[in-house]
Amino acid sequence: MIGAYSADQVRAAERPALDAGMGAELMRRAAFGLAMTILREARTHCGRVSGARVAALVGKGNNGGDGLWALAFLAHRGVAVTAVLVDSSAHGEGLAALLSAGGRGLQLVSGAVSGDTAQDDEPRDGTADDGTAQGDRVHDGTAEGDTAHDGAARVALISPAEARDECVRADVLIDAILGTGARGGLRGTAAELVGLLERERTVAPDFPFVVACDVPSGVDPDTGEVAGPVLRAGATVTFAAAKAGLLLPPGAGAAGRVNVVRIGVEDRLGEPVVRRLGAEDVSRALPRPAAEGHKYTRGVLGVVAGSEEYPGAAVLACSGALSAGAGMIRYFGPPSVAAVVTAALPEVVCHSGPELRGRVQAWVLGSGVSGEGQLDRCRQALSLGQPAVVDAGALDLVSEGDEDRPEVILTPHAGELARLLSRLGVDRERSAVEATALDSLREAVRLTRATILLKGPHTVCCEPGGILYSQADGTPWLATAGSGDVLAGILGALLAQGGAAPSSSGGEAGQGHWAATAALAAAVHGRAGRIASGEAGGGRGHPITARDVARAARLVWDGP
């Protein structure tokens, strides 16, 4: 299980070591781990270490100190290193170590003339709005870490445009501007430079590989919200533990791969605020039949999906459920749709009457549903008090809740969540949901008292108790018509089988069970997409259909 923590949790874990005078040691551990990642990326992206070029955008706090010490380590390994200092002060010991190792320092200022050099303790034009935020403390928490530049005669002034040109010549570029204590994003010349670099990325075929130090600058470490321009990273090297914002959208999209460097404080972190199922977690949590089982004990799923307008949704939801191990599926819908389901999936038992009948243990409701007849069937199913997936058309039936119903799992995408919130009195556009995914999700859970799976490249699941999961197992090829219907079927089948890690005693599921089950379904769906597209086998990926995903879902059981 991957756990992610708040910035306050990490600071509290570091505090005993800092109080014991170990701040410098923690920084060196962090910087060494960062340097080792840079060396691996240098080998990957330019085939060598000695002579590789690494540049870093360096802020005034200890995040910048991590970057400076990492550059010093790299210089001793034969790497050509350059620090672009975005503030008028920098971590003194780190800068001295960089310059002593033969690294270059460049001071970013507006209107600089190439060849100018910085002067100790002298104001510099354009540095008042420096792009860093107050409180950017990571490891030592002391103001003494920020000093005017030692050896300033070797620190030349450079404009944002010149700094951009310097950075794009590197093989690897480090973002070490803002750390976990910063809020409000980049400002001033730092923001200008990052904006220039992001524009350059769109036209430069050989743009350097970007590694973020602890968090990408401008990404909130707790919520994943993004303020101002952000330099999107291919990898983020974070210290002690993953920060929650690295697993939550939209910030997770700027973080790339997340590598955690242990610095010796991890046993004091406590419980994570965000969880992610890894490959082995998924394999352990998947339900498997008992030797004495039969179709009823393996889970009977009721499906109210599809309509005369969208008959394929019913087929896809049932297909996903079959591949995810449901012992039996009962389909409820119009005769014309039932005929399509029977022709495509003869294993499914179809019912065309207006009443729901037969043994059912969980439900999939709403995929492709339109028309009063299907909506009435959805209402009947919701009134039964059984676990249910509420998707697409059935989301319109969800109202403000008076008591927790975590076994009801809503599966909106961002646009559907925006409409749900607006209907419940919280006016929010889709773009606002995408920008404030965690806040929007929590607000919807608070209002509905249901578990919600918010679909997207980073799928976030939250239940009324506040337990959060974030999964990113998929591929962009999953963005295809009907993919969500398959996901609903997979989740419904897992619910019918007891959910993630079902209790062998048959007792009530504990806190976090429903969010974990939603996360497990997202993981199966994402991994099925990677299998179907060929990416799981090491390929570059190819177009897939929702039917391909449904067929591949069963292969996830062969994992991890």
Image: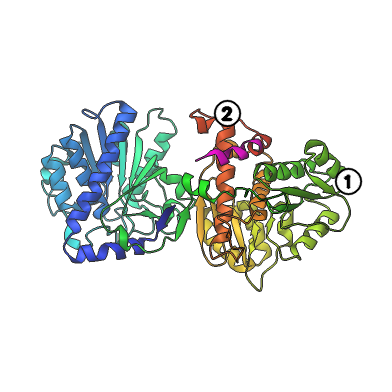
Q: Secondary structure at mark 2?
A: loop
Graded by Cα atoms within 10 Å as few (under 14), some (14 to 19) or many (20 or more), the crowding at tag 2 reads few
Image position of 15 (left or right of 209): left
* Residue 194's disc number: none
Image position of 59 (left or right of 120): right
Q: Secondary structure at mark 1?
A: helix
Q: Which residue position is annotated with label 1?
A: 335
Query: What residue range appears in magenta?
Result: 551-560
Residue 126 pos. (x, y %): 27, 50
Residue 548 visible in rendering: yes
- Residue nearer the viewer, 309 or 462: 462
Quarter assignment of residue 199: top left
User: What's the residue at 75%, 65% (across, down)?
Assistant: 384
Q: Residue furthest bottom?
A: 402
The residue under label 1 is which amino acid type? Answer: Pro
Q: Residue furthest top?
A: 47
User: What's the residue at 20%, 50% (across, down)?
Assistant: 28
Quarter assignment of residue 222: bottom left
Q: Which residue position is annotated with label 2?
A: 542
- Residue nearer the viewer, 321 or 293: 293
Verify CB contact (< 8 Å) between mark 2 and mark 1. Answer: no
- Residue nearer the viewer, 305 or 35: 305
Please, is residue 336 above or below residue 300 in the view? above
Q: Main secondary structure of the magenta part?
A: helix
Image position of 462 (left or right of 111): right
Please, is residue 491 above or below residue 528 in the view? below
Q: CA distance from mark 2 to mark 1?
A: 36 Å
The residue under label 2 is which amino acid type? Answer: His
Any magenta on residue 322?
A: no
Please, is residue 322 above or below residue 136 in the view? above
